Amino acid sequence: GAGGNHSCAIKTNGDLYCWGSNASGESGVGSTTQVNTPTLVGSGYSKLSVGYNHACAITTAGNIRCWGDNTYGQLGDATTTQRTSPVTIDSGTTYSSVASGTTHTFGITTAGVLKCWCYNNYNEIGDGTYTQRTSPVIIDSGVTYSSIATGHDTPTNMVFVTVDPRVGTAAAIAERLATDGVLAMPMDPQRLRMVTHLDIRSEDVPVVVSALSKAAQGR
């Protein structure tokens, strides 16, 4: 994954490496010195999401760890303290997905619960407030989520995909929405949830993407 000025990757053996700018500790190597070559951050990782100046990763045990800039609480450790190496957040909860943006981070637990921790100055959480959240809070309680993607620059460029037995391509739809630029369009969870609860076949994904894009632009 690539952030503002740094990159991270997980090898097939679970080793996590980062490199690049490190002014906020976003390379996770325990310092703020620029890292010019891929450097080992830790082992036992399975998933990764790199934000603008921070990153979060999920271990093979399902624990979520974050590091880097934390000015807006985007690391989720209940502080706004910069972290130069990974810190575990939401201890005791296991995660299946994570998505890091500029000043916000989302995660989905193994139970399908969607959580967010962020600046929330543009109501990125979607809770109707502008209250900063420095630790994970539940979004849309009672709804089970399977996939999530988030953008970097705008507060409304988020896509949520829920689990529904009638939809077998939720992950594919989320991926296509992200790659086709629909993430830059205003989208709320309720609108997308209604769309993904339709019986959408994989070959229909381009049509869905086009329809959502036009709807988001008011066409």
Image (spheres, helix red, strand yellow):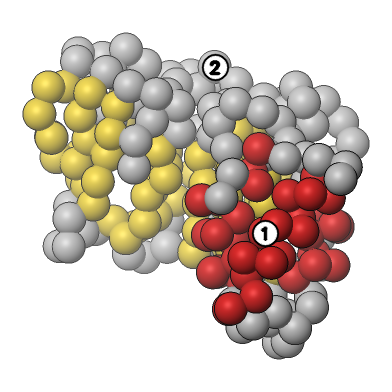
Residue 90 point in image, percent of width and height: 55, 48
Q: Residue at x 28, y 34 (%)?
A: 7
Image height of 204 relative to 22, above or below: below
Upstream in sequence: badge 1 or badge 2: 2
Image height of 114 relative to 201, above or below: above
CB of mark 1 within 8 Å of CB of mark 2?
A: no
Residue 174 point in image, percent of width and height: 59, 61
Which amino acid type is marked by label 2? Thr
Residue placed most toward the observer, 157 or 27:
157
Q: Residue at x 44, y 51 (%)?
A: 64
- Local crowd size for mark 1, using a 10 Å CA cut-off: few (<14), some (14–19), many (≥20): some
Q: Is residue 134 left or right of residue 124?
A: left
Which amino acid type is marked by label 1? Val
Residue placed most toward the observer, 169 or 111:
169
In three-dimensional space, the C-alpha distance between marks 1 and 2, rounded to whole angstroms, equals 35 Å
The secondary structure type at the circle numbered 1 is helix
Image height of 219 relative to 204, above or below: above
Q: Residue at x 32, y 12 (%)?
A: 23
Residue 71: mark? 2
The secondary structure type at the circle numbered 2 is loop
Residue placed most toward the observer, 44 or 167:
167
- Quarter assignment of residue 116: top right
Image height of 119 relative to 48, above or below: above
Residue 209: mark? 1
> Which mark's residue is nearer the viewer, 1 or 2?
1
Residue 129 point in image, percent of width and height: 87, 31
